[in-house]
Amino acid sequence: MSKQRASAEREVMKSNVTYKARQFNLSGLNGISDKTLEMHFKLYEGYVEQTNLLNEKIAEFLKDGKVDQDETPAYSEITRRLGFEYNGMVLHEYYFDNLKRTGGGDPDRTSSFVKAAEASFGSYEIWKADFVGIGKMRGVGWAMCDQDPVNGRLSNHWITLHEIGSVAGFTPILVMDVWEHAFLLDYKPAERPKYIEAFFSNIDWTSVEARLQHPKGEPAKASRR
């Protein structure tokens, strides 16, 4: 084996990170049943499993330090699929992390999040109306409040599936799953607004605020992982 090939294989091995599904203690949420959570956790674990599987397949393609022409179609399909599975894993971790039992509903009026919402939208109420409006949009996906790391401004976005609609470089601050699996055992599809109300009653605003960036762009104490 040549030194070049051996080096390439070592690099592939180092980059082939194995992710482990995290555990979340969220039983007893308001308006989101334990049965829904059990199903949701299993779905999340599936994204973790698929992320690891696809990374292994990509590593196999790269074991000789290149992608051969006849491998390109399969390699391309797997790589595109990885974006869906990986983001499915990551977004669910954000989602579960910004929930807790006995959540506070709306945040304290003097909180950093409210101040950021006021600076970005004029008022917390306008920010919330925009976020909820996005959550009620037709189709499956995610409603996400992001922060621009350059100027600290908050903005709300619709994420189609998992990987389409995210703004490059922005920091997720609040993430709401609006795929029907997030609420279908508790609410009819047309009752999504009731699920959104339940979501807000379970928000862990301490976790949300920990994701906010300081004015100079320095990260807050907590991070996703």
Image (tube, rainbow, N blue to C red):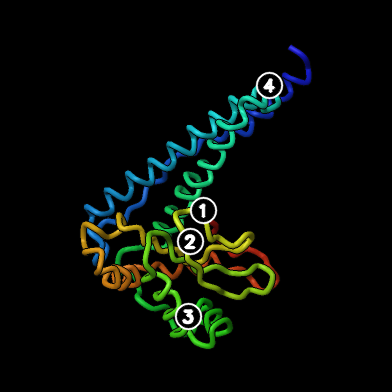
Q: Which mark is residue 64?
A: 4
* Marks 1 and 2 close (CB-CB < 8 Å): yes
Question: Of tags 4 and 3, which is closer to the observer?
Answer: 4
Query: Most extreme residue toward the bottom, as rendered?
Result: 122
Q: Amino acid at mark 1?
A: Glu
- Disc 4 element: helix
In depth, the one of 95 and 220 nearer the eye is: 95
- Mark 2 closeness class: few <14, some 14–19, many ≥20 residues within 10 Å: many
Spatial separation of the CA atoms under disc 1 and disc 2? 7 Å
- Mark 4 closeness class: few <14, some 14–19, many ≥20 residues within 10 Å: some
Residue at 31%, 50% in the rendered image: 40
Q: Amino acid at mark 4?
A: Asp
Q: Which circle's residue, 3 or 1, is located before the other in the chain? A: 3
Q: Which residue bears the numbered disc 1?
A: 163
* Marks 3 and 1 close (CB-CB < 8 Å): no
Q: Which mark is residue 127?
A: 3
Q: Amino acid at mark 3?
A: Trp
Give the quadrant of residue 100: bottom left
Residue 181 appears at what percent x and percent y? Answer: 30, 54
Q: Which circle's residue, 4 or 3, is located before the other in the chain? A: 4
Q: Which circle's residue, 3 or 2, is located before the other in the chain? A: 3
Residue 88 appears at what percent x and percent y? Answer: 45, 49
Spatial separation of the CA atoms under disc 4 and disc 3? 51 Å
Q: Is residue 191 above or below residue 111?
A: above
- Mark 3 closeness class: few <14, some 14–19, many ≥20 residues within 10 Å: many
Give the quadrant of residue 184: bottom left
Q: Amino acid at mark 2?
A: Ile
Question: Of tags 3 and 1, which is closer to the observer?
Answer: 1
